[in-house]
Amino acid sequence: MSATQAHRARSTAVVLVAAVTLAGCGTKREGAGQDPDTPVHVRLYGSDANMTNSLRNKLDGNPGLLSGMTGTAPLLKLPETFKTRLRSVDASLADFGYAAEAYDAVMIAGLAAESARTVEAPTVAKFIVPATTGGAECDSAATCLPLAKSGRDFAYRGVSLSRSGLTDQGEPSSASYGTLHFGRDATINDNLTEYVGAGDERSASTAAAPPPAANPNSSSNKKRALKVGALMPHTGRLAYRSGPRFAGAKLAVADLNAAGGVLGEPVEWIDGDDGTDAAVAAATVDRLVGLGVQVIIGASSSSVTKAVIPKIAAAGRILISPSSTSDELSAVPDGGMFFRTAPPDTLQARALADVIMRDGPKRVVVVAREDAYGMGLQQNVKADLVAAGMAGDDIALLSYPASAEDFAGIAAGVREARPDAVLIVGYEETATIVRALAARKVGTESGLAGY
């Protein structure tokens, strides 16, 4: 079967996926045969990839369908000064999702290179985790770079890594999540946002940094700048919400340079697109490697990150993702070259399950895209809902190909399940799913009222 034929077959199978999944979960089909004009009011939930103000722009003419939608995202209460500085980089920012994580990814890379006294990626990689653990705490380029230059142990406590450092696996040991709410104007009501801590600070690494390079002014290091490349989406299904990540990364480069640069040289920023697509990302990695980039920030989606890690490891470059959250990434062989400032989805799943259970639903449908991010979070949320007391038979799991564009089958499956809660784990296609649900008269009461 050709790739095109396979794509068509998978897209056609969406209706079948819905029916089979519902049957396999043992969900009662009380909606079968019901008057299709009878509205099915549900509580609508989202996750980090779709709980953003940018989503309303994908619902031209009907942004009110998002009214009442609730969800979670790795989020902390950002200082207003940080938001203002981000807007000085990109005045068009509608929200700040993963801006702090992107900022910290670049900052950690710069501090690690200064501590290592080299820009050689395999050596710098050994200093990434130690830059966030042990020693004197510091929170900026201005306060951390002098410690790194003097060879002192320090612990970077930046914008997102404010509570604790990275684990031995190179991912956050703790995180902050925000519970977000779309208001009647289809924008997130910041006044209702709640912040909840997650993770275990005791899981942070205790490993010490190795000895630095012998001579920072040796011929192999002298006049070599640290080059940081972007592997984040200008195009593809995550492009609509990647602005904050680019702004955060560029701001960190500016701050490092304002504090004197790394090893006496300005840090260089080289732009790049991951396309929310493995093939596009692979080509960008090749280009960045060819340009001598030592540290790459990205990718944005977990599936793309997973796809390029082998290439990164083979090239001996560092990859730090500010937004890839799939649990699978914790165990992907990476040669010690992959890190992330985004917390793994085991933490978000617990936060999501808690938000859902607070509303007391009797039956939940979890709709997810078929990739590392969607499938991982879907399974984790179900496990946490069951652990919280919900019967497994009352949780239906529906999925769709990541390239799908028609969600009529998914909407039919959701309506047939007669849920009182629907969680959508998706990217920008979430808008199309919400519209498909509304066409079947499934949605929040306030959202359907204006449809």
Image (spheres, grey):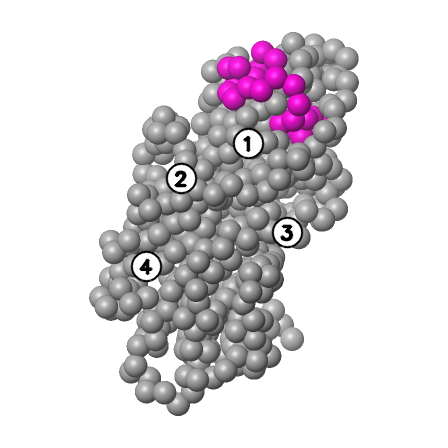
Q: Give me the residue at 59% from left, 61% from top.
A: 387
Q: Which mark is residue 327?
A: 3
Q: Which residue is mark 2?
A: 96
Q: Give me the residue at 51% from left, 20% from top.
A: 140
- The amino acid beneath tag 2 is Phe
Instruction: Magenta stretch: give its range.
Output: 124-147
Q: Which mark is residue 68?
A: 4
| 68 left or right of 267 in image | left
Residue 393 falls inside the magenta stretch: no
- Gap in Å between the C-alphas at discs 1 and 3? 21 Å
- Gap in Å between the C-alphas at discs 2 and 4? 21 Å
| 174 left or right of 436 in image | right
Please tell me which of labels 3 and 2 falls first in the chain: 2
- The amino acid beneath tag 1 is Arg
Please tell me which of labels 1 and 3 falls first in the chain: 1
Residue 115 rendering spot, x and y as whole percentages: 67, 18
Q: Main secondary structure of the magenta part?
A: helix
| 70 left or right of 17 in image | left
Image position of 179 with respect to 337: above or below: below
Element assignment for label 2: loop
Residue sitting farthest toward the left: 450
Q: Nearer the viewer, mark 4 or mark 3?
A: 4
Q: Nearer the viewer, residue 244 or 23?
A: 23
> Is any part of residue 122 visible from this angle?
yes
Q: Nearer the viewer, mark 1 or mark 3?
A: 1
- Gap in Å between the C-alphas at discs 4 and 3? 29 Å
